[in-house]
């Protein structure tokens, strides 16, 4: 934003736009990583649960 001849001129802030773009790219990458991690943890927990159920860990025998 600047003032020329008594008029207020609004210009786009290139640095701010680049910063926002970088933040968006970073967040997209982090979300992808967390989705993969979540899926792996979910599979691990499911495998442990199935193993515990089949071994009769909770008094149930398959």
Image (spheres, rainbow, N blue to C red):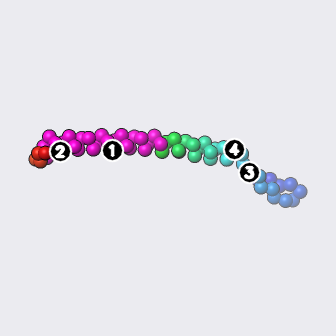
Residue that label 4 marks: 15
Q: Position of residue 6 (x, y in %)?
A: 87, 59
Bin the neighbour count of mark 4 within 10 Å (Cα to Cα): few under 14, some 14-19, many 20 and up: few
| 62 lies left or right of 22 | left
The residues bearing labels 1 and 3 have C-alpha atoms spaced at a distance of: 44 Å
Q: Which residues are magenta?
A: 32-58
The secondary element bearing badge 4 is classed as helix
The residues bearing labels 2 and 3 have C-alpha atoms spaced at a distance of: 61 Å
The secondary element bearing badge 1 is classed as helix
Residue that label 1 marks: 42
Residue at x 48%, y 45% (from the top left corner): 31
Residue that label 2 marks: 53
- Please say if the residues under marks 3 and 4 sit with CB atoms less than 8 Å apart: no
Q: Compare residues 23 and 29 and report the one nearer the observer.
A: 29
Residue at x 62%, y 47% (from the top left corner): 20
Circle nearer the N terminus (1, 3): 3
The residues bearing labels 3 and 4 have C-alpha atoms spaced at a distance of: 9 Å
Q: Quadrant of the C terminus?
A: top left
Residue that label 3 marks: 12
């Amino acid at each position: 934003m600047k003032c020329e001849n008594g008029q207020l001129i609004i210009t786009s802030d290139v640095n701010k736009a680049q910063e926002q773009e970088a933040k968006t790219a970073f967040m997209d990458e982090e979300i992808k990583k967390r989705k993969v991690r979540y899926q792996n943890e979910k599979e691990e927990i499911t495998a442990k649960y199935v193993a515990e159920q089949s071994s009769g860990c909770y008094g149930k025998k398959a």
